[in-house]
């Protein structure tokens, strides 16, 4: 499988990254080159192999459902690019 | 005094005997950093950052910290424009453990490839770090700042993070010790995530004893990291015995093939002979799926990264582009904030997870990861550890591989499988090339068997002189 410019454009939209035409050109070529290398995986028969998404045999690690202290609002907001009172400010979403 | 030249354990011993104070250590280290930092550029935000963090006056040794490990009140920017000015509201768990052990950390952070994406520290928004052994060469990456700082005596000991070799490869390039712990051994809470199923924090140090000491401090269960292992932490310093008699070591034939620099090969073979002479038993083994590791890694790691880096959207922290609408804000913020390699990896990962490509790429990579893990399980049934070169080449020149991402990815060919299998590995200095560049020996063992790595590495080190070599700066 290879990747064309249109696909890279679609993926960039999914990833919410604006690409300049020159960037799109360069990245498309590089990604195609990388994917051609990755395609060596298709030579392996993986039909009956279970996937490993995680190396430890862990499942549903839960903590006790008890109240505990958390970060103070002031600390949580201290890096906000824009804030008002106890809130993060974002551009208007609803017209 | 030139206390910065000493190892952490030597300094701790002197403090204990009341020969020196930590104030003296800090003052000596400050002078050293002021003297040579302009050449090496191991640290970032110099001189705007405070050199010292709280607790530095404690009776301990300050640890230098990679720029992706959160330090409360001290900027942590992952060497990315998108996190410019980020001042964490809390400490990573490893930082709290360092403070609790009576040691401290530097407010000045170590350079790295942006978000740990790279093998040369050239992808830092602050510019590259220079290898102390040859200032025209890269220090390796992504923990290149931590490795170069330790090698140049600008750090007494340091923390890095390793997702595909990012502790071991720079340790090898800079001639220091670097240990990547078992996945889950060290808490990842407060480590800004790259690939959550692969990332581990670990030590970069001047010798194996320091690595054992720092491992003892940072290891252990953390309720704030659901993937941390709830197992007792051994006293790693007890593993430092000078004896490898009868230890069974496998040499994977797939690692000694085309692409391995002949000089590196020769140096590794000498190291193997040394260990043989000390009583270790060697046998050739096979890790048949090794050739697929890099391909598997660049699907899994980028897929996880694309998901982890979705949080950098201009809302809660870091850069926000000045725009009108919300979608425009996301796209422009990320376009301006991420460097080339970050964009490349986010796009590759998003592609591998996208509808229509998921089965062919992501799912297939997870399956081949199983095969790679099984290769190791198979070998560790009969062997205590595996020995390989850490990197196929010594440090390369700055700029040599920046235009060819794939070539850069292949420099991690010997380190990547370890992260995919979640096992621990260490790199120890084992020689210098004719041009005077360090070479690292990599030792691998099974899950939670860091003690075996330390024992073997310590024995090798005690019977050689490589760890005492210092670059001329």
Image (cartoon, coloured by chain):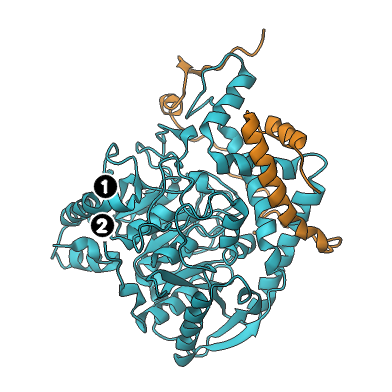
Chain colours: A orange, B cyan
Q: Position of residue B315 (x, y in %)?
A: 54, 24
Disc 1 marks which residue?
B55
On the same chain, marks 2 and 1? The answer is yes
Which badge, 2 or 1, comes first in the chain's sequence?
1
The residue closer to the viewer here, B344 or B403, is B403
Name the residue rendered at 81%, 58% in the picture.
Answer: A42
State whether residue A51 appears in this view.
no
Disc 2 marks which residue?
B60
The chain identifier of the residue carrying mark 2 reads: B
Q: Position of residue B117 (x, y in %)?
A: 54, 48
Res B44 label = none
Q: Label 1: state its secondary structure.
A: loop
Name the residue rendered at 41%, 34% in the picture.
Answer: B89
To which quarter of the image does residue B242 belong? Answer: bottom left
Q: Quadrant of the N terminus of chain B?
A: bottom left
The chain identifier of the residue carrying mark 1 reads: B
Q: Distance of mark 2 from mark 1, alpha carbons?
A: 9 Å
Name the residue rendered at 62%, 42% in the picture.
Answer: B344
Image-based side of B14 in relation to B124, left or right: left
Q: Label 2: state its secondary structure.
A: loop
Q: Is residue B318 above or below residue A62?
A: above
Q: Position of residue B427 (x, y in %)?
A: 47, 69
Q: Position of residue B458 (x, y in %)?
A: 40, 77
Name the residue rendered at 67%, 72% in the picture.
Answer: B377
Classify mark 2: residues with Cα within 10 Å, few (<14), some (14-19) or many (20+).
many
Q: Are marks 2 and 1 in contact (CB under 8 Å)?
A: yes
């Amino acid at each position: 499988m290879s990747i064309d410019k249109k696909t890279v454009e679609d993926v960039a939209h999914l990833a919410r990254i604006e690409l300049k035409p020159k960037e799109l050109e360069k990245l498309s070529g590089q990604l195609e080159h990388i994917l051609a290398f990755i395609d060596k995986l298709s030579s392996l028969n993986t039909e009956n192999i279970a996937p490993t998404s995680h190396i430890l045999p862990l499942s549903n690690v839960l903590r006790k459902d008890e109240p505990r202290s958390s970060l103070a609002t002031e600390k949580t907001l201290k890096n906000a690019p824009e804030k008002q009172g106890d809130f993060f400010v974002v551009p208007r979403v609803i017209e | 005094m030139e206390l910065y030249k000493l190892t952490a354990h030597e300094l701790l011993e002197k403090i204990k005997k009341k020969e020196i104070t930590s104030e003296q250590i800090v003052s000596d280290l400050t002078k050293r950093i002021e003297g040579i930092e302009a050449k090496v550029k191991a640290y970032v935000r110099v001189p705007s950052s405070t050199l010292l963090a709280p607790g530095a006056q404690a009776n301990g040794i300050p640890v230098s910290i990679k720029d992706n490990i959160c330090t409360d009140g001290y900027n942590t920017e992952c060497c990315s424009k998108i996190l410019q000015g980020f001042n964490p509201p809390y400490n990573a768990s490893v930082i709290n453990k360092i403070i609790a052990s009576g040691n401290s950390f530097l407010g000045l952070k170590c350079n790295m490839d942006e978000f740990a994406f790279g093998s040369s520290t050239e992808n830092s928004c602050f510019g590259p770090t220079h290898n102390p052994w040859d200032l025209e060469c890269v220090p390796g990456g992504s923990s290149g700042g931590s490795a170069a700082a330790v090698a140049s005596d600008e750090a007494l000991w340091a923390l890095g993070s390793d997702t595909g070799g990012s502790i071991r490869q720079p340790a090898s390039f800079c001639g220091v010790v670097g240990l990547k712990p078992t996945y889950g051994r060290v808490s990842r809470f407060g480590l800004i995530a790259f690939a959550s199923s692969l990332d581990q924090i670990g030590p970069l140090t001047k010798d194996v004893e320091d690595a054992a000491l720092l491992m003892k401090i940072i290891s252990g269960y953390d309720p704030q990291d659901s993937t941390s292992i709830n197992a007792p932490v051994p006293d790693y310093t007890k593993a430092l015995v000078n004896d490898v008699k009868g230890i069974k070591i496998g040499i994977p034939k797939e690692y000694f093939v085309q692409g391995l620099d002949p000089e590196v090969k020769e140096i590794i073979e000498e190291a193997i002979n040394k260990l043989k002479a000390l009583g270790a038993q060697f046998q050739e083994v096979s890790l048949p799926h090794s050739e697929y590791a890099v391909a598997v890694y660049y699907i899994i790691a980028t897929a996880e990264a694309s998901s982890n880096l979705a949080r950098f959207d201009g809302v809660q922290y870091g850069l926000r582009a000045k725009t009108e609408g919300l979608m425009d804000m996301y796209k422009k913020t990320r376009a301006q904030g991420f460097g080339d390699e970050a964009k490349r990896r986010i796009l590759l990962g998003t592609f591998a997870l996208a509808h229509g490509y998921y089965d062919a790429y992501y799912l297939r990579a997870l399956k081949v990861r199983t095969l790679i893990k099984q290769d190791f399980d198979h070998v560790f049934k009969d062997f205590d550890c595996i020995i390989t070169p850490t990197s196929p080449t010594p440090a390369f020149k700055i700029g040599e591989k920046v235009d060819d991402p794939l070539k850069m990815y292949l420099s991690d060919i010997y380190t990547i499988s370890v992260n995919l299998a979640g096992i621990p590995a260490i790199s120890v200095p084992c020689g210098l090339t004719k041009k005077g560049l360090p070479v690292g020996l990599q030792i691998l063992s099974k899950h939670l068997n860091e003690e075996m790595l330390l024992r073997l590495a310590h024995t090798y080190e005690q019977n050689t002189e490589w760890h005492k070599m210092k670059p001329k700066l």
